[in-house]
Amino acid sequence: MKYKSQKVAYWFFALSMLLLSLQIIYGFIMAFAHMGYDVLHQITPFNTARAVHTNLLVVWLLSGFMGAAYYIIPEEAEHELVSVKLAYIQLITLAIVGVVAIVGYHFNYWEGRKFLEIPRPLDWLVVVNVLTFLGIILMTLFKGKKRTTTSLVLTMGLVFAALLYLPGMIWFDNQTMDSFFRWWVVHLWVEGVWELIMGGILAFLLIKITGVDREVIEKWLYVIVGLTFISGILGTGHHYYYIGVGKAWLIIGGIFSALEPLAFLGMALFAIAMYRKGEKKHPNKIALSWTLGTAIVSFVGAGFLGLAHTLPGVNMYTHGTLVTAMHGHLAFWGAYGMIVLAFISYSLPNLTGRKYYDTITGLLAFWLSNIGMIGMTVAFGVAGVAQVYLERKVGLEFGEVQKEIQVHFVVLAICATFFTTGIVCYIYEFVKYGTPNDEALETIKN
Amino acid sequence: MLSKSQAKVFFLGGTIVTFAIFLGLSWNSLSNEVPKRTHEENLTPQVIAGKHIWEKNNCMGCHTILGEGAYYAPELTKVYERRGEAYIKAALMSKTPWAPRGRQMVAYALSEQEANDVVAFLKWIGNVDLNGFPPKPDLKK
């Protein structure tokens, strides 16, 4: 760590770890409900568990992105964060809003719109919170000595993510309009501006870990985020096939969303090529595994599995089935979960001055969580395809089909146990590192 | 070989062009297609009240509508046509968890009025033109 104010990143990562743990618990509640053991129905019915599970995901990822930005921006801009105090206030309010929302979901206090369940008054607090965050980042960049491409792409991603939150706060009487603009938030986040954030973080990690020339890495960063937007913006059309808008979206959405894997393929090839090209052998092997891992798994999960059901003829049958859950799990894990964990693995030794670069627990965390998540994806996939066939082709009742596919949720829970063990190892390492301290300043170069 | 400034132009240019096309297509859909395809003239205060109840209780947390939501309970876009008013009202007004095939629904115990609102919403959404979704089961004997 080169700047004292970077330490604030650690606490955002700590919040991420806490929320990730909770997210997993709610995932298990749902897996058991799918198996037929809906034992917590009175306290946490499925719709509560579902809203908590997805919202915790969004908040822990955002907290991770924010932490990463608070670490990256001072180093790239060569300037301390303009206000550490405000950053801590922002962290605490983020945690409070998150906790109030999640507790509220247990008492029917929500908006009931998939992924955007946070009730309106809390939405405004989120807006204030994010504006504070962006204010700190932008002021630091403004006062800093340098404005690198990496920091600009990252910042652009964060600013657009904030702007795109707003269409989700408009009230519509018409469900079709509601859905139309909900995807401006959800799709343009995860298949658009979040990829800028991911790209920015990935570029920073590759510069630090591989030692390849910044100019080369940043050139390819532009190409990748260019591909992301060219395919991803019009790719929004794949959410518009069957919601009550015209047939033009079947063609536009079909073509452009089929191009979306290119951006992720680019990201994977880019990371591998830079790794090969790099002459520097950075000692932090765990961070390297996560960095290459996120590039590769995001291509498989977000790119390839997305392509599997994005064409209109296929999506007609898979839309609104467990096939979507299959794609969703590996996509979020590969693209966003893993990039946050990659960044945490990279930054912890620098923040704390302790070099646990190559531990067995760290390695176990990587492999168990990935093997577990891939197994879960397969379980969702098999259940999803069986559901599509029995329900949409053969025409069995929904409830009958669900009984037939219950067994796949047993497999899911077993794989989820592997995944959880991996995450427990990761958090064990996180705790072992201890808290950041000033002695770590400049003790480690890069 | 591609230079960094060319890469930047590719990114900015591509983004601006595709975003402009996206805005144009969206504007066309929202102003010309949605009113007709969703029969906006039928969006009565009762339908809108039904949508409020639908959202207030996070029905999308288990069910899908327009194919969107969670995959724990049946898709409801065509439920009015499939089950009819009486069945839907019974499920919504039940004081004990509705569980036709073992899987429990939260017992919302809605009033007659509220249940009618939700039924009106579901009846309205069943008539939206969805480009053929949900598909007819073509292997059904």
Image (cartoon, rainbow, N blue to C red):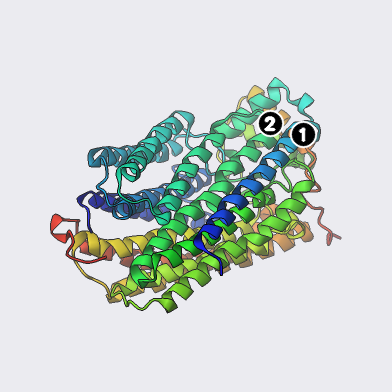
- Mark 1: amino acid: Thr
Q: Is residue B79 left or right of residue A67?
A: right
Q: Position of residue A139 (x, y in %)?
A: 33, 40
Q: Which residue is mark 2?
A: A174
Instruction: For label 1, count other residues whose C-alpha is less than 10 Å away and answer few (under 14), some (14-19) or many (20+).
Output: many
The answer to whether residue B58 is seen in the rendering is yes
Residue most extreme to the right: B141
Instruction: State which quadrant residue B33 falls in.
Output: top right
The answer to whether residue A384 is seen in the rendering is no
The CA distance from mark 1 to mark 2 is 8 Å
Q: Is residue A54 left or right of residue A324?
A: left
Q: Are marks 1 and 2 on the same chain?
A: no
Q: Position of residue A243 (x, y in %)?
A: 72, 43
Q: Nearer the viewer, residue B127 or B84?
A: B127
Whether A3 is drawn above or below A334: the answer is above
Whether A351 is drawn above or below A87: the answer is below
- Label 2 marks which chain's residue? A
**Residue at the spot 35% in from the left edge and 61% down from the top edge:** A343
**Residue at the spot 70% in from the left edge and 26% down from the top edge:** B47
Q: Which residue is mark 1?
A: B38
Instruction: For label 2, count other residues whose C-alpha is less than 10 Å away and answer few (under 14), some (14-19) or many (20+).
Output: many
Q: Position of residue A308 (x, y in %)?
A: 66, 64
- Mark 2: amino acid: Asn
